[in-house]
Image: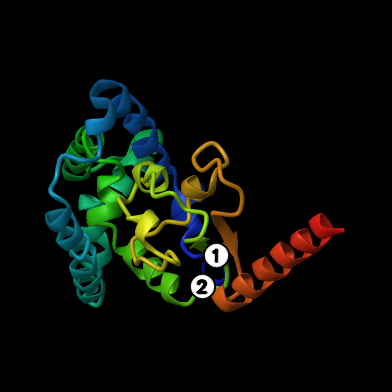
């Protein structure tokens, strides 16, 4: 939780093994469908479907309030089914759901994380007030949409000053130098936008002054 307050859901972006499985399948999906991959659903529908995981979160809290609730959730949870493969103790229902999620990953990047995962929904709330966040410099952005196209969660990074979307998993794919070639256009920072703007103006004025000299 402390790490999430600082950086957002980095557990989802860098640590979760089930997320890694979906990422690996996504590589195959990318090769099969290329630019069409992760864009099969209409944007409006996809945006609405992202809120399903908050229904999943509420149901999870309600179910776990019952004494047998945790046992029930473990039987249907694909994450537990994935771990059960290695312990040879696996739920048939959970394994079936796991297979469906893996199959969907061929068409949609991280379908479990994007539409269902209750824990991801909980951590996603911290995106609203995390300390370090991704910002976009409008003055240098050319609107190429590369940052948005690389986002596994389908966030329109190129239209936001700050990425505060609840579905962001802090994977930092969009801030990679391989994605955006323009320096200081998409980057991670803890500074306020006003502070960044003042800092950039000071740098520009210094460069102008040095050029004059």
Alpha carbon separation for disc pair 2 and 1: 6 Å
Q: In this image, 79 relative to 198: left or right?
A: left
The x and y percentages for residue 65 are 25, 77
Residue 166, above or below 19: below
In the orientation shown, which residue stands out farthest toward the front? 212
Q: In this image, 92 relative to 148: left or right?
A: left
Pointer 2 with pointer 1, Cβ within 8 A: yes
Q: Quadrant of residue 53?
A: bottom left
The x and y percentages for residue 75 are 22, 51
In the orientation shown, which residue stands out farthest toward the right? 213
Residue at 55% over, 74% down: 193
Secondary structure beneath label 1: helix
Residue located beneath label 1 in the image: 7
Badge number at residue 130: 2
- In the rendered image, the quadrant that contains the C terminus is bottom right
**Is the image coloured rainbow, by chain, by secondary structure, or in one colour?**
rainbow
């Amino acid at each position: 939780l402390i790490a999430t307050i600082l950086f957002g859901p980095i557990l989802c972006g860098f640590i979760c093994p089930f997320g890694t499985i979906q990422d690996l399948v996504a590589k195959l999906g990318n090769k099969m469908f290329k630019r069409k991959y992760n864009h099969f659903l209409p944007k409006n529908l996809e945006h609405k479907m992202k809120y399903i995981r908050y229904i999943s979160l509420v149901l999870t809290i309600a179910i776990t309030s019952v004494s047998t609730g945790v046992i029930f959730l473990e039987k249907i949870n694909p994450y537990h089914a994935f771990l059960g493969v290695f312990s040879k103790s696996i739920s048939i229902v959970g394994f079936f759901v796991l297979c469906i999620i893996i199959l969907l990953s061929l068409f949609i990047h991280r379908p479990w994380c994007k539409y269902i995962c209750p824990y991801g929904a909980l951590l996603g709330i911290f995106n609203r007030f995390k300390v370090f966040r991704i910002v976009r410099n409008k003055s240098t952005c050319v609107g190429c949409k590369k940052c948005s196209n690389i986002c596994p969660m389908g966030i329109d990074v190129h239209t936001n000053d700050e990425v505060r979307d609840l579905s962001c998993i802090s994977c930092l794919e969009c801030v990679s130098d391989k994605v955006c070639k323009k320096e200081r256009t998409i980057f991670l920072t803890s500074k306020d936008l006003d502070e960044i703007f003042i800092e950039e103006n000071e740098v520009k004025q210094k460069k102008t002054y040095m050029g004059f000299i």
